[in-house]
Image: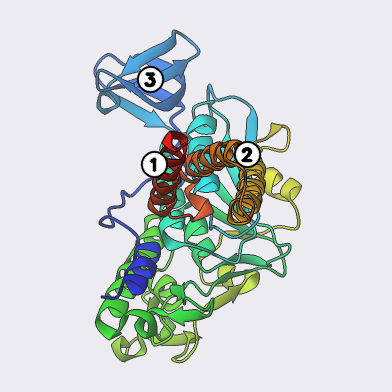
């Protein structure tokens, strides 16, 4: 495979097998009853472990280490802190620095024992590999529920891989006039044009990636009792979905699987278009839980109207840090270009050596930034080779008379 296509493939494909555990709708551990002794503790579990036991904050004993298999755990908020921590995902999911910040924030916030973490979403999508990391952080936060609020704004909803992030949450609330879906995977060509995977990588590889992403999205949906076939239809425009009833149950199936005794209710997805749902449609087909007009209405619905609201600005800080790094990199690059032009114009030996020392220092600064911030998308190896050439020339000039 050509190097250009291999690079695109590495940026598009997400690593690892799809392994998801089924958690309860609200999986916070609040009342702990020992199955043998009947001892009762109130508090909340953290993600930390010591000697294979979960670290649990309790009202009765402070921090204790429990083998949770020996305890009956009921999510009733007894012993949790009366606060809600809010995180905002307000842009494209494209930067590793922001993804890492969000992963770490979910772990940190869940260990503080809030009633729940509220993830407010308004995104057009982004990289599947980064979205998968965010989904993993959410599903692994077993000690604290993460609730999605598709709030609307610049992008109007949870679109593309943003839908996957919402599916990973234990509940999905949507504001009016928002949408969720259109979660197909695409890549960006060398000219900056969006390309379907089959167009970019060929039929076999493109379908392999798409198939894995369909399965992943369906698994995220099904772990929180949402129709997996509807999630698949958000990825694949060839998937059709109808809703039928049978024995009082609602089923979402492919039309070819409809049996005579099943009553057709509605066609949700037709061939030729990716499934995208309005807030009303998402609630009707059980993809979302409820429509709310505001964060305050959501808090009331979850019995958290009186909770302390804590805003976690980890993503905003990460974005500002990357912006500073980008400005620093650009400044060093411009200065380096100027110094290289000065060397081309010819200099006295002392002046030339001084400029070469500055060039060497600038290259080292660029390399350090590129290693620390992969989002700069700079080839570190090329910079290091250029630095070696400058170093060799500097040593040669230094020894010359």
Q: Quadrant of the N terminus?
A: bottom left
Tell me if residue 227 can be seen: yes
Q: Which residue is found at the position 41% from the left and 58% from the top?
A: 129
Q: Which is nearer the eye, 293 or 197?
A: 197
Disc number lying in front (2 or 3): 2
Q: Mark 3 highlights which residue?
A: 55
Residue 313's image quarter? top right
Residue shown at the point (55%, 65%) measured from the top left = 125
SS at badge 3? strand
- Tell me which numbered mark, 3 or 1, is placed earlier along the sequence: 3
Q: Measuring from the top left, give residue 170's x and y in whole percent.
A: 48, 50
Spatial CA distance of label 2 from label 3 is 63 Å
Q: Is residue 275 shown left or right of residue 68?
A: right
Q: Tell me residue 181's x, y (percent).
A: 53, 71
Rendering quarter of residue 32:
top left
Viewer-side label of 1, 2: 2
The residue that disc 1 covers is 140
Name the secondary structure under disc 2: helix
Tell me residue 178's x, y (percent).
67, 68
C-beta proximity under 8 Å, tags 3 and 1: no
Q: Which residue is mark 2?
A: 351
Position above or below: 134 against 92: above
The disc, 2 or 3, on the residue closer to the chain's N-terminal end is: 3
Proximity of marks 1 and 2: CB atoms separated by less than 8 Å = no
């Amino acid at each position: 495979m050509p190097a250009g296509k291999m690079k695109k493939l590495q940026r598009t494909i997400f690593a690892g097998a799809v392994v998801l555990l089924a958690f309860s709708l609200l999986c916070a551990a609040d009342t702990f009853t020992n199955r043998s002794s009947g001892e009762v503790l109130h508090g909340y579990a953290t993600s930390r472990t010591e000697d294979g036991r979960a670290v649990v904050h309790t009202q009765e004993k402070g921090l204790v280490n429990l083998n949770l298999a020996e305890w009956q755990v009921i999510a009733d908020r007894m012993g949790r802190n009366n606060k809600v921590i809010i995180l905002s995902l307000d842009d494209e999911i494209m930067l590793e620095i922001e993804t890492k910040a969000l992963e770490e924030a979910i772990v940190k916030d869940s260990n503080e024992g809030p009633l729940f973490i509220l993830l407010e979403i308004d995104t057009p999508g982004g990289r599947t590999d980064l979205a998968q990391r965010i989904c993993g952080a959410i599903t692994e936060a077993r000690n604290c529920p993460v609730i999605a609020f598709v709030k609307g704004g610049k992008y109007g909803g949870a679109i593309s891989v943003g839908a996957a992030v919402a599916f990973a949450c234990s509940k999905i609330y949507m504001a009016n006039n928002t949408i969720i879906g259109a979660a197909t995977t695409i890549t960006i060509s060398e000219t900056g044009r969006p390309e379907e995977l089959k167009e970019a990588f060929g039929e076999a590889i493109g379908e392999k990636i798409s198939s894995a992403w369909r399965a992943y999205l369906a698994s995220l949906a099904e772990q929180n009792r949402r129709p997996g076939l509807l999630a698949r239809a958000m990825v694949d425009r060839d998937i059709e979905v109808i809703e039928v009833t049978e024995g009082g149950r609602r089923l979402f199936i492919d039309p070819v699987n409809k049996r005579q005794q099943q009553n057709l209710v509605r066609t949700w997805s037709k061939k030729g278009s990716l499934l995208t749902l309005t807030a009303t449609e998402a609630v009707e087909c059980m993809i979302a839980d409820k429509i709310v007009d505001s964060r305050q209405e959501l808090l009331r619905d979850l019995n958290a109207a009186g909770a302390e609201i804590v805003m976690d600005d980890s993503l905003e800080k990460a974005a500002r840090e990357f912006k500073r790094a980008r400005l620093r990199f650009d400044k060093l690059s411009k200065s380096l270009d100027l110094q290289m032009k000065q060397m081309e114009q010819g200099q006295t030996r002392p002046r030339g050596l001084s400029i070469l020392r500055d060039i060497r220092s600038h290259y080292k600064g660029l390399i350090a930034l590129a290693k620390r911030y992969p989002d700069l998308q700079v080839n570190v190896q090329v910079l290091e080779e250029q630095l070696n050439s400058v170093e060799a020339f500097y040593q040669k000039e230094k020894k010359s008379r």
